[in-house]
Amino acid sequence: MRALFFRKMVDIDELRYYTELNRDQPGESYVVTKEVVLNEYDFLNFSNYFMRPYKWIDSDDGGLTEDGKVRCIRVINEDSGDVVLVNSEGYNYARYTALE
């Protein structure tokens, strides 16, 4: 699986914009380390401000695997099915994000 990860996106609208702008790029291989399912309210709070710290994002949830794949969290909106991938890269916020 491949996805386009972007650094320090403010919200899901900015992420969608840059994903569309770069849609011809191949993206990076990734592996999901855990899944977080949020209700509509919590997902909207998360997706409207990625830079806020979240208790379910650990500093060791991101980075790269030994074979160079991006380690990430799959964040799912249980109501709409929208999915955002998060590579914390050593922080407790969504430092790198991608759409799945």
Image: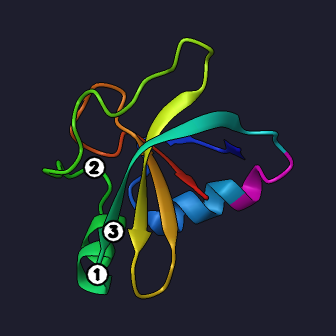
Which element carries disc 1, helix, strand or loop?
loop
Reading the image, the residue beneath label 1 is 39
Q: Earlier in the sequence, mark 3 or mark 2?
A: 3
What percent of the width, then of the height, locates residue 40?
32, 84
Tell me the crowding category of disc 3: few under 14, some 14 to 19, or many 20 or more residues within 10 angstroms, Cα based: some
| C-alpha distance separating marks 1 and 3 | 7 Å
Secondary structure predominantly adopted by residues drawn in magenta: loop
- What amino acid does circle 1 point to? Asn
Disc 2 residue type (three-letter): Met
Q: In the figure, is residue 2 to the left or right of 35?
A: right
Please say whether residue 21 is one of the residues in the magenta stretch. yes
Q: Is residue 73 above or below residue 40?
A: above
Q: Nearer the viewer, mark 3 or mark 2?
A: 3
| Disc 1: CA contacts within 10 A as few (<14), some (14-19) or many (>=20) | few
- To which residue does mark 2 refer? 51
Residue 65 higher or lower than 91, as above or below: above
Identify the image quadrant of residue 88: top left
Q: Check disc 3 and report the residue beneath it.
A: 37
- Mark 3–mark 2 Cα distance, whole angstroms, equals 19 Å
Upstream in sequence: badge 2 or badge 1: 1
The crowding category of the residue bearing disc 2, from other C-alpha atoms within 10 Å (few below 14, some 14 to 19, many at least 20), is some
User: What x and y, as percent, mark residue 76?
Assistant: 42, 68
Residue at the spot 58% in from the left edge and 42% down from the top edge: 5
Instruction: Give the Cα distance between marks 2 and 1.
Output: 19 Å
Residue 1: x %, y % from top left:
71, 44
Start-end of magenta stretch: 20-24
Dot 2 lies on which element?
loop
